[in-house]
Image (spheres, rainbow, N blue to C red):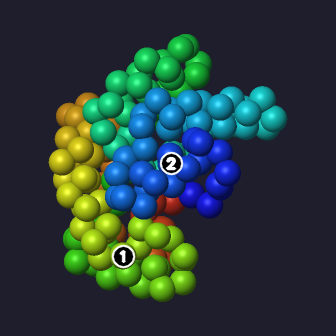
Amino acid sequence: RKKTGSELADLINSKIAAGQIVPASITVRLLREAMESIKSETGNTKFLIDGFPRSEGNVTVWDEVMTEPGLANVEFVLFLDCPEDVMTSRLLERGQTSGRVDDNLDVIRKRFETFRNESMPIVERYEKMGKVRKVVADRTVEDIYEEVKALFA
């Protein structure tokens, strides 16, 4: 989000500022490169990918690019379930200090609409596969953290 000066960075930043999803081909390419780099440097083969996949296109590209044996296996999807009014309040509060261009009410509303239309069907898809672990997220940070930590134990 903060990188600038390249065509790719400008494209990503403009999508984020408009509350839109970055094209899957870009996201998956960047994820794969980062995962391969970390794996070669540290040997780590477990990754938590925040906010992905967000759309059918993300899943399709992920399946095409990441399904080589030993490359990536989705063990589970962590779904933090929180009412929109709580998320709105939290995002607006974060926006006071974050410097993020997408932490304003208009973009937040667009992001929620995008989430309902594009991301919830993906959550439902993984839920049918028995891979979703839901955490109620309108509680304290400490309570949420403890529940999430237990899922990774």
- Secondary element at tag 2: helix
The residue lying furthest to the top in this view is 69
Name the spot of residue 76 as percent of width and height, x first.
40, 40
Q: Mark 2 Cα within 10 Å, few/some/many (few <14, many 20+)?
A: many
Report how far apart the C-alphas of labels 2 and 1 lie in the structure.
18 Å
Residue depicted at 28% across the width and 33% down the height: 56
For the residue marked with disc 2, what is the amino acid? Ile
Please give the residue where the numbered disc 1 appears in the rendered image: 104
121 sits left or right of 73 in the view: left
Give the residue displayed 32% in from the left and 67% down from the top. Answer: 107
Q: How crowded is mark 1: few (under 14 residues within 10 Å), some or many (20 or more)?
A: some
| Residue 77: image location, x then y, percent | 38, 44
- For image coordinates 58% across by 22% down, the residue present is 71
148 relative to 2 in the view: left or right:
left
Q: Mark 2 points at which residue?
A: 12
Quick check: marks 2 and 1 in contact, CB under 8 Å? no
From the viewer's side, name the closer residue of 69 and 33.
33
